[in-house]
Image: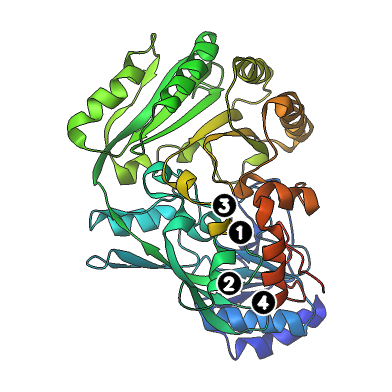
């Protein structure tokens, strides 16, 4: 570390942002990521202000033989946005959203969060698919897929990507789009951070809002099985205008277990009530917030359930069907949940992204069905063993009911290697490895769900 410290002065001569060493007063805050279980200590944090800073940081890391980690929003559960003893390229200061209303496009900095993005685009009555938590980073979510409220209507975030500016492993700054480095553009749409550091994104926007229909309806845990079966029935008939998520969770009182359906409707307002009323009328709900809401506000409603610094451990798989036996297993497992912050969520995937062939982008999860996520979350390090054990035991119970595919952004830090690649990319693995060999033959960017370069 002393050697790195002595070299920082030289790097600072060609660096516009801030270079933080462990002695810096803001070091402790800067080294942390969203998941409180991740406790790593880089040798240097480079808070970049643009692509030139990123390129300088990449070259410096290579000259000093330092591993490179890249932080966009820092939200990813795996904690791959940081490292021990290496260089953390921190894009948190690289926040901007430039909207072109007439062209319906937006250019976005690599450190931008979805809340910022939605605020700027909604001023113009425009939106694109983003996350369901406003503090999530645009970069990581998009590069790994980008599921969100608007997924059925407009596709995933990556399906609305028009191009990126990316810093490669040799420090070059290039553009990737349909008409420029198209192989790289194919790869970054789902390939995570394997191919470089994306300094900016260009998105296609759509007319939407400011008011939509959305919210959450919940029932007591005694109705959990009925609720999940009802959710399955709703999913079977859902149009592209509807996004549905079911969850078994604990109410804000910290003790009452509940079954909930979160819904968003993004079609003609004249028929909104007719679409959502069956949810509101089902059984005897104990919570009902489903109704008119601004799109911007809808994207903040789940923020409190994912506090920064909470300890997280996730397990997830995709399943084509939600059988009665699977529902029974999910309910039984949630009854054993040790933390009021944990949940089992089920996202229904249908509509626009399922009409895109898996080979069209690196992102291969294109079948209609359900994303089952065992989201274990708690506050105290003393509860680590219980939190991890519950997630693993639940995942083992659910294994007979799920398939082999997985949403990349839900993989935790112990999901790696060939099995993780096959689960995330399916038939696209070999092409990704060939493109990796072209743009990052030395596997410089490997602190991710790593795609090793194909060797001849």
**Foreground of the two, 277 or 309:** 277
In the displayed structure, does residue 163 sit left or right of residue 37? left
Distance of label 3 from label 2 (alpha carbons) = 16 Å
**Residue that mark 1 sits on:** 29
| Nearer-N-terminus badge (3/4) | 3
Distance of label 1 from label 4 (alpha carbons) = 33 Å
Q: Secondary structure at mark 4?
A: helix
| Nearer-N-terminus badge (3/2) | 2
Residue name at image x 41 percent, y 23 percent:
234
**Foreground of the two, 378 or 370:** 370
For the residues bearing labels 3 and 4, Cβ distance under 8 angstroms: no
Judged by depth in the image, the label closer to the viewer, 1 or 3, is 3
**Quick one: quadrant of the N terminus?**
bottom right
Find residue 402 and report its image quarter: top right
**Residue that mark 4 sits on:** 439
Q: Secondary structure at mark 2?
A: helix
For the residues bearing labels 4 and 2, Cβ distance under 8 angstroms: yes
| Nearer-N-terminus badge (1/4) | 1
**Residue that mark 3 sits on:** 358
| Nearer-N-terminus badge (1/2) | 1
Residue name at image x 48 percent, y 51 percent:
356
**Residue that mark 2 sits on:** 184
In the displayed structure, does residue 169 sit left or right of residue 184? right
Distance of label 1 from label 3 (alpha carbons) = 40 Å
In the displayed structure, does residue 313 sit left or right of residue 454? left
Judged by depth in the image, the label closer to the viewer, 1 or 2, is 2
Q: Secondary structure at mark 1?
A: helix
| Nearer-N-terminus badge (1/3) | 1
Residue name at image x 55 percent, y 66 percent:
186
């Amino acid at each position: 570390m002393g050697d790195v410290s002595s070299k920082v002065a030289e790097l600072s001569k060609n660096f516009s942002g801030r270079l933080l060493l462990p002695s810096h007063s803001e070091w402790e805050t800067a080294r942390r990521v969203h998941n409180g279980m991740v406790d790593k200590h880089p040798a240097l944090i480079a808070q970049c202000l643009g692509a030139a800073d990123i390129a300088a940081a990449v070259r410096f890391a290579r000259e000093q033989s330092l591993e490179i980690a890249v932080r966009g929003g820092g939200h990813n559960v795996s904690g791959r946005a940081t490292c021990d003893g290496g260089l953390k390229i921190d894009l948190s200061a690289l926040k901007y959203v430039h909207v072109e209303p007439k062209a319906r496009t937006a250019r976005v900095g690599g450190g931008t969060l979805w809340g910022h993005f939605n605020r700027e685009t909604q001023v113009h009555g425009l939106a694109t698919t983003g996350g369901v938590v406003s503090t999530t980073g645009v970069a990581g979510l998009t590069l790994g897929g980008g599921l969100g409220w608007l997924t059925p209507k407009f596709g995933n975030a990556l399906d609305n990507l028009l191009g990126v500016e990316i810093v490669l492993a040799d420090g070059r700054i290039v553009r990737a789009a349909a008409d420029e480095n198209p192989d790289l553009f194919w790869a970054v749409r789902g390939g995570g951070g394997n191919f470089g550091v994306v300094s900016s994104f260009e998105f296609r926007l759509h007319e939407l809002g400011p008011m939509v229909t959305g919210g959450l309806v919940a029932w007591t845990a005694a109705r959990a099985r009925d609720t999940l079966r009802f959710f399955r029935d709703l999913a079977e008939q859902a149009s592209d205008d509807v996004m549905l998520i079911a969850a078994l969770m604990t109410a804000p009182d910290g003790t009452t277990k509940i079954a909930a359906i979160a819904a968003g409707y993004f079609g003609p307002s004249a028929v909104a009530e007719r679409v959502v009323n069956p949810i509101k009328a089902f059984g005897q709900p104990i919570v009902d917030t489903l109704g008119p809401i601004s799109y911007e506000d809808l994207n903040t409603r789940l923020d409190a359930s994912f506090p920064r610094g909470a300890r997280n451990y996730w397990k997830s798989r995709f399943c084509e069907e939600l059988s009665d036996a699977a529902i029974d297993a999910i309910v039984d497992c949630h009854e054993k949940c040790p933390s009021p912050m944990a949940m089992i969520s089920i996202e229904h995937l249908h509509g626009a992204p399922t009409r895109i062939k898996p080979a069209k982008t690196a992102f291969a999860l294109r079948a209609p069905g359900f994303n089952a996520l065992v989201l274990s979350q708690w506050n105290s390090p003393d509860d680590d063993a219980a939190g991890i054990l519950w997630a693993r035991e639940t995942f083992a119970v659910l294994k007979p009911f799920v398939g082999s595919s997985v949403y990349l952004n839900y993989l935790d830090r112990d999901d790696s290697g060939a099995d993780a690649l096959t689960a995330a990319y399916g038939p696209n693995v070999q092409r990704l490895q060939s493109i990796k060999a072209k743009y990052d033959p030395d596997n410089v960017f490997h602190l991710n769900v790593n795609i090793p370069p194909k060797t001849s």
